[in-house]
Image (spheres, grey):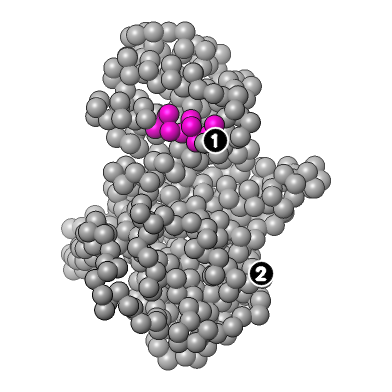
Amino acid sequence: MTATTDIVQKLWSLCHVLRDEGISYLQYVTELTYLLFLKMMQETGNEDQLPQGYHWSDLVAKEGIEQITFYRALLLELGTNGRSRVQAIFANAQTALKQPRILNKLVTSIDQLDWYSAKAEGLGDLYEGLLEKNASEKKSGAGQYFTPRPLIDCMVELIAPQPGELVQDPAAGTGGFLIASDRYIKQHTDDLFDLSEAQQSFQRHQAFYGIELVQDAHRLLLMNMMLHGIEGAVGLGDTLSPDGQRLTKADAILTNPPFGTKKGGGLPSRDDFTYPTSNKQLAFLQHIYRSLKPGGRAAVVLPDNVLFEDGQGRQIRSDLMDKCNLHTILRLPTGIFYAQGVKTNVLFFQRGLTEKGNTKQVWIYDMRTNMPAFGKRIPLTKVHFQDFEAAYGNDPNGESSRTDQGEDGRFRCFTREAIAKRGENLDISWLRDESLQSGDNLPEPEEIAALIMTKLQTAMEEMEALTALLEPDEVDDEIPEDSEALLPEIQ
């Protein structure tokens, strides 16, 4: 067991104490973020970023009612008078702790951890381990912000971000794609030492950027990036508003946008979308291919409905295949996300140098049919992506030599003409699903329940959208900020 793993387990064990106090898993991780930030500022020698009198040692020195009163004042002070990134992490921060003894237990436990070993292994890895632990707890609901690391690593490796490129995530969550992209570049540049001083500065301050909608997730994102030495611009805002229009065009986009429909059928407040739609995934897809530089590339996780939805969906897919070379689709297995019933895919495409006819053929890899039901019993690992990565090839833009594996294989090629005859429907499967012939590989009961709930949610959203069309003056088309976090956003 590494020191990082040991610390994560010790921190997580404290969560059970707080559960008895009525504090949720996500509240606990947010609370830990505040406290770990103070402690890590001390450990890394960066307390000059904090106002005098509001350091970790000042908190440790107090006890009882005085300590919790000081802690509340500290949160307010750092959210108003700290440096810009400190203010962003502590913006509107409030503690869920009410008992002085609980705060004292957290502070004492954190102070007694093996920080020397943790620093040697990397404080960023420690924090990511904590986020991953939180996401794996189904009761926490935090999985909506967390894409499985093996999937992230696969997407990043195939897109292969390079030094000097702008890498964007318009639905940044806790920063998984940006952190992995930074790690990939560091691994290929001797931790940036192969680069010039100017190039190193670009990688640390400008290369990685994006937007996150939910403030609590944004705090975790900022903390994660800070601990990995990344200071890119990751704002708090809505990509489907003018905030998204202001993002600089990217060389590479890696993302997992939120799932769901705009409440009441409302449309994104942007005037640059050719095809306005209340479907968030279709709106994000338009943002992504419009935000790529000519020749830029993207990998994006999207649910099945994006592949087959008619109307605006069909037009958006056609526009995507005109403006970009949609060269590869990976049909992901079920059960790998917090919202287990959601069936998802990864679309890989490159922005063309022209506006028409860029997609000539689409390769589809079926990693879903006759695959095991992933979950706690069978965790998803990097090994499961090896066959797909070999079939994809080394060229990020799908130009490697490929082989159609036929009707019995997982990798097949479909011409643009064949897709057009299907009404631009990209939801293509050909393998016989053996699980339909046997009860041996049925999903877990909780997965079946999640699928039913997902279908019911979709039906309710469609009914709300229809109601909004019939009675536009009586339905509020804006989604409350708090409600946004309840949708199954899995990044």
Disc sitting over residue 394 in the figure: 2
Is residue 270 highlighted in magenta?
no
Amino acid type of disc 2? Asn
From the viewer's perspective, tell me whether residue 171 is left or right of residue 65. Answer: right
Q: Provide residue 145's location: percent of width, then percent of height.
A: 41, 48
Q: Is residue 311 above or below residue 407?
A: above
Which stretch is magenta? 3-12
From the viewer's perspective, tell me whether residue 47 is left or right of residue 202. Answer: left
Is residue 10 highlighted in magenta?
yes
Label 2: few (<14), some or many (≥20) within 10 Å?
A: some
Asked if one can make out residue 371 in the rendered structure from this viewpoint, the answer is: yes
Nearest to viewer (mark 2 / mark 1): 1
Tag 1 residue: 2
Amino acid type of disc 1? Thr
Q: Provide residue 80's location: percent of width, then percent of height.
A: 47, 25
Q: Quadrant of residue 160?
A: bottom right
Q: Nearer the viewer, residue 82 or 409?
A: 409
Name the secondary structure under disc 1: loop
Q: Is residue 193 above or below residue 402?
A: above
Q: What's the CA distance linking mark 2 and mark 1?
A: 33 Å
Count the numbered circles shown: 2
- Residue sitting at x 42%, y 91%: 421
Q: Provide residue 8's location: percent of width, then percent of height.
A: 46, 33
Q: Quadrant of residue 3?
A: top right
Which of disc 1 and disc 2 is earlier in sequence? 1
Q: Provide residue 77's location: percent of width, then percent of height.
A: 46, 20
Magenta stretch: helix, strand or loop mostly: helix
Name the secondary structure under disc 2: loop
- Residue sitting at x 66%, y 71%: 395
Disc 2 + disc 1, Cβ < 8 Å: no
